[in-house]
Image (tube, rainbow, N blue to C red):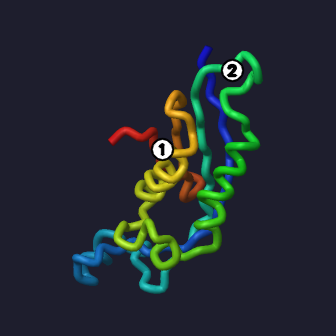
Amino acid sequence: MRLTVSRKSHFNAAHRLFNKNWDDEKNQMVFGKCNNPNYHGHNYELIVHVTGELDPDTGFVMDLKELSDLIKAEIEEPFDHKNLNLDVPEFENLNPTAENIAVVIWEKLRPFISESKELEVVLYETARNFVSFKGEF
């Protein structure tokens, strides 16, 4: 029997969408307000889904306390109240779009979750704009 368990989390972070290979005019044309040289912030909502077989001994797909602790250590602590462009090494050379942030989160969590389980990350940048990633490259 396969089930999905989910954990919701959040973090607040600033970023600037900017391609360093483009001039200011092209960056402004493509990224608009999100290209503000002084950065801008979001209250990100994160939902992590883990799908797998129900363990007959525990009744868990995954211990949600373990998932909560993992998200806190790997995502909340490194990202919360940070400037993603300046403070988070994964974005030193990667534009911190919602899409790229979701992929980075997935990549940070994947090593800690059994390969027998599916992992999906859903990241809300705003209440109406969100992205999901299941590890399909």
Image position of 22 with respect to 102: above or below:
below
| Mark identifier at residue 92 | none
Q: Residues within 10 Å of mark 1 (few under 14, many from 20)?
A: some
Q: Are marks 2 and 1 in contact (CB under 8 Å)?
A: no
Q: Nearer the viewer, residue 13 or 53?
A: 53
Q: Amino acid at mark 2?
A: Asp
Mark 2 or 1: in front is: 2
Q: Which residue is mark 2?
A: 55
**Residue type at numbered disc 1:** Ser
Task: Choose between 76 and 25: the one closer to the eye.
Answer: 76
**Location of residue 24 (image quadrant):** bottom left
Residue 135: x and y in percent read 42, 41
What residue is at 35 percent from the left and 74 percent from the top? Answer: 18
Depicted 65 relative to depicted 58: above or below: below
Q: Position of residue 136 (x, y in %)?
A: 37, 38
Kindly identify which residue carries mark 1.
Answer: 132
Q: Where is residue 116 drawn, in percent x and y?
A: 52, 28
| Residue drawn at x 61%, y 20% as measured from the top left | 53
